[in-house]
Image: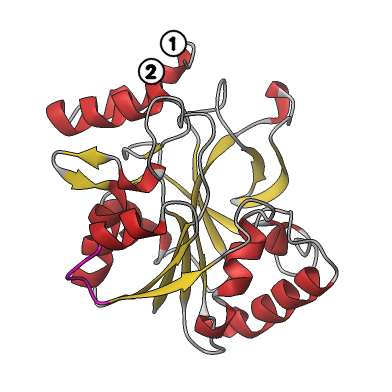
Amino acid sequence: MRAILLAAGKGTRISRYYKCPKSTLEVNGVSIIEHSVGILEDEGISVTAVLGYGSEAVRGCLAGHNTDFVMNPFYSVTNSLGSLWMAKDYIREGEDLLVCNADVFWEKPVLDRIISSADGPVMAADSTRCDIGDYFFRVSDGYIKEYGKELPRERRTHEYVGMAEIPGNCTGRFRERLERMTWNEEYGEWWENVLYAHLDEEPVKIADLPDLFWGEVDYLEDYRRITEYARTGDVSSKLDRKFNKPE
C-alpha cells in the first residue's frame, strides 16, 4: 500500500495564529504529519508527501523517515486535485492507495477501520458531527449519495474526515480520471471530486468513526481540541465544535 499525504496548502484560516504549515503543528511534542507518518510506517505503508507552502518545515519534521517528497510549486493557485496530480507517478494500478489530508490528526484505529471496509473506494466519515463542520455527506446503506460544504442540515448524516482508500482494483481508473480532470483544467477542485464525479458508476462507501477521535486543523479551536484530547484521552472532546464558535 502507498499513502499520499497532501501537505501543500497554506491554511489561511489558522495562519494568523501560526506562521507555519498546519501539518507541522505539534501535539505532545510531535508534529501532526510526523505522527501520521509514524503510524503508516509502523504498518509497512510507503509514504509520499506533497509539499508546497513551508516545504522546508515539513521536510524538517520528517527528517529520519523514509518519505518520498513531491513538490507542487503552484500550490497558491491550485487546489488539492493539482497537488495529487503532482504525485500521479505514485498512483500505481494494482497497488492499494491511501490519500490523506496532512492536517488531520488521527490514530491507528482510524487507519484500521478505513483499510478494512470494502473492495471499492472508501472515505472516512463521522456520523456524530453533522451540525458544524467543514464538509458533509448524506449516506444511505453505507454509501455516499450527496456531498458538499453547504449540504442542508436535514440531509447531512456524516462529516468527512479527510482520508480515503482506493483499493488496487480501482487505482488505474482513479489515476485516469485524475489526469483527465487535470488536463481539463479542473486543478482548482478538491481531489475528492475525482471520486464524487463517478459515484453512479463506482459507488463510494464510508468508514464511520463515531467512537474514534480525529481532528482536522482549520481553526484555532480545532487545534485546541486535538491537544486537549492528547492530554486527557477524552474522545468526547471531538464534539466541542458543536458548542464553541471557531475563532
Which label sits on residue 244? 1
Which label sits on residue 240? 2
Q: Is residue 109 above or below residue 148?
A: below
Q: Measuring from the top left, give residue 84's x and y in whole percent.
A: 58, 67
Provide the residue span drawn in magenta. 62-66
Q: Residue at x 50, y 49 (%)?
A: 162
Quarter placement of the N terminus: bottom left
Q: Is residue 150 visible?
A: yes
Q: Is residue 62 above or below residue 226?
A: below
Q: How many marks?
A: 2
Q: Is residue 131 magenta?
A: no
Which label sits on residue 203? none
Amino acid carrying mark 1 in the image: Asn
Q: Is residue 106 visible?
A: no
Residue 163 is left or right of residue 200, and the answer is left
Amino acid carrying mark 2 in the image: Asp
Q: Residue at x 31, y 63 (%)?
A: 59
Q: Measuring from the top left, give residue 100's x and y in whole percent.
A: 46, 58
Residue 13 is left or right of residue 179, and the answer is left
Mark 1 is surrounded, within 10 Å at the Cα level, by few (under 14), some (14 to 19) or many (20 or more) other residues, namely few
Q: Check disc 2 and report its element: helix, strand or loop.
A: helix
Q: Measuring from the top left, give residue 188's x and y in whole percent.
A: 74, 54
Q: Is residue 65 magenta?
A: yes
Between 104 and 132, the one nearer to me in the picture: 104
Q: Residue at x 33, y 52 (%)?
A: 110
Q: Residue at x 58, y 64 (%)?
A: 73
Between 222 and 156, the one nearer to me in the picture: 222
Q: Measuring from the top left, give residue 71's x and y in whole percent.
A: 50, 69
Q: Check disc 1 and report its element: helix, strand or loop.
A: loop
Are discs 1 and 2 less than 8 Å apart at CB? yes
Q: In the rendered image, which quarter is residue 223 located in? A: top left
